[in-house]
Image (cartoon, rainbow, N blue to C red):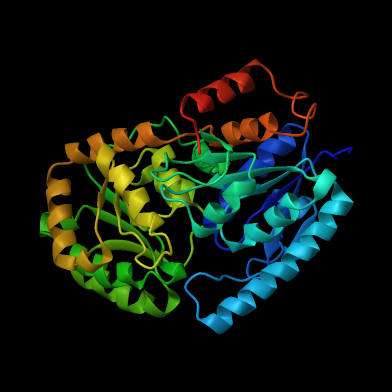
Amino acid sequence: MTFSRTIIIAAGGTGGHFFPAEALAEELSRRGWTPALMTDARAGRRETGIFAQNQQFVLPGAGVVGRGPLRAFRGIMALLKGTLEARRQIRILHPAAVVGFGGYPSVPPVLAAAFSGKARPSIILHEGNARAGKANAFLARWASAIGLSFPLAEKLSGSARTAITGMPVRPSIVALAGENYPQTNDRLRLLIWGGSLGARIFSDVVPKALASLPQELRSKLDITQQVRTEDQEKVRAIYQAAGINAHIDSFFNNVNELLRGAHLVIGRAGGSSVAEISVAGRPSVLVPLPFAASDEQTANASMLQKTGAAWMFKQSDFSSEALSELLTDLFRHPEKLTVAAHAAAQCGRADAAARLADLVEVVLPSGMGTAYAGATERQHIRNTEEGSHRS
């Protein structure tokens, strides 16, 4: 069987899956591979970035976990339809590999690849969380290799090669790696993100917590907060009444600049968010999403908290009073923030895209992975193997 230079990348949903998928696609393209995107209707076609320059396939699909029997059945039928379409495209493209980034959008392409017979491409999964998601746990039995952002406590089925690659992040975030943590002498800059996807908890808790800080601390604050459109007027009014300088919006295009200046980040603990915070070397207060199917965000936040890089609240414990008490202590003892920033930087892997690309090339069909790999890449592979294990 002759394989092409195409590598299919399966990713969908929010930026948490797309940002690492784009970072990998850019690295593979630099190495002479042709990335093709398979995604779901919820995400749709990409109009910007590397995927906009290459082939894209929007497949049927839907979630199954946590749904009622009828919706679960409809989800299974949609995934089956998507798998048949993915298999048709794989027969046309003859890809060397399919890389899945988790979630239900990765299920049809990976299943289609697994049952492609003699035309079977290599299958690589990436798990961005400290606890494997349902989709990756299901698909692992067919994988040739699995790249991990964190060591997993539980074993995955199958005999795939597993390696700690880290989570690929946007190049603009990678550029922050190694920069010094900003001084806290005159201003205290907070970045609160996650609001546009429904994290109303931050709009309810954070402004009240900051407004209750002692006046000498409030006067030093510069707040940038992502807030749902319908909540912006309420949040802005609280900050104005407290005399706190705040910039409120539903979306920010300059996350790299905001992270560069931030002394503290408050938000959820998704794999992509945690990776970006770590690569940038910023301390954080993390409130894991309480409804995730595998509770992976709690596992992510716990990993950073154990290293001293973050403070974690369960959402049920995340109150204005509790947050105000923590922030008062941190702002009056900024050396604690500096220590946490250093710990966060130790957790970051700025070269994750290269490490994951190395892993992809190692398990490609015979003879296909050697055209690019040189001394640097082989060293990446050796490094990943040092943290790897057989599942």
Asked whether 157 or 227 is in front, the reply is 157
Residue 213 is left or right of residue 149, and the answer is left
Q: Residue 105's image quarter?
A: bottom right
Residue depicted at x 72% and y 63%: 45
Residue depicted at x 64% and y 59%: 107
Residue depicted at x 31% and y 58%: 223
Residue depicted at x 68% and y 53%: 110
Query: Residue 131: horizontal and vertical position, in percent?
Result: 42, 50
Query: Residue 291: horizontal and vertical position, in percent?
Result: 38, 68
Residue at the far bottom: name it.
Answer: 70
Please say whether residue 191 is visible from this viewpoint.
no
Query: Residue 199: horizontal and vertical position, in percent?
Result: 38, 69
From what the image shows, is residue 351 above or below residue 6? Answer: above
Query: Residue 281: horizontal and vertical position, in percent?
Result: 37, 38
Q: Residue 171's image quarter?
A: top right
Asked whether 144 or 376 is in front, the reply is 144
